[in-house]
Image (cartoon, grey):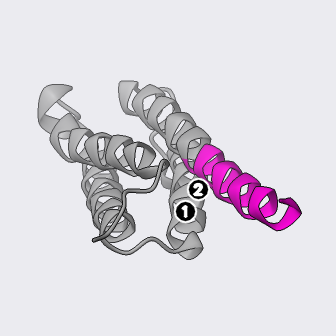
Amino acid sequence: MRTARRESPLDLYNLVLGAFLIASPWLFHMTREVARIEAWGVGALLVAISVAALLAFSLWEEWISFAVGLWMIVSPWVLGFAHTPAMKLNIGIGTVVMFLSGLELFLVYDRTHESVSS
């Protein structure tokens, strides 16, 4: 019997954020095509990574999620949709994704070092 990791809810939150990103072009009527494509692509990537992390956890999945969150923060300037509502959405969700991934990495690191010291 497989036991759930205590960090699993964080992957579930990233999954929900990815699904929200996929729906965001319709919810917020994004007019710039590059912002819509970026939201769909990043949302799909977050959903795929989160599902993979829920099914078979590995640290690389959290590092990729962290990098995706960082990309979301800088992408409005790189892709040219700064000063739009899509920029605010990307920065907000990117910050949350980075926080959740960083928290999960910290919790896994803390658990492995806790068991070594015991």
Q: Which quadrant, please, contains the N terminus? A: bottom left
Q: Circle 2 is placed at which residue position?
A: 66
| SS at badge 2 | helix
Residue at image position (15%, 28%) is 27
Q: Are marks 1 and 2 in contact (CB under 8 Å)?
A: yes
Left or right of 27 in this view: 114: right
Between residues 77 and 3, which one lies in front from this camera angle? 3
Residue 78, x across and y down, in percent: 57, 54
Tell me which amino acid carries mark 1.
Glu
Indicate the quadrant where residue 111 lies. bottom right
The CA distance from mark 1 to mark 2 is 6 Å
- Kindly give the residue lying farthest to the front in the view shown: 118
Give the foreground label among 1 and 2. 1
Q: Is residue 84 at least partly visible in the picture?
A: yes
Between residues 39 and 116, which one lies in front from this camera angle? 116
- Kindly give the residue lying farthest to the right in the view shown: 117
Indicate the quadrant where residue 98 lies. top right
Relative to 118, is 95 above or below? above
Secondary structure mostly seen in the magenta stretch? helix
Residue at image position (38%, 43%) is 9
Q: Circle 1 is placed at which residue position?
A: 62
Magenta stretch in the rendered image: 101-118
Left or right of 74 in this view: 110: right
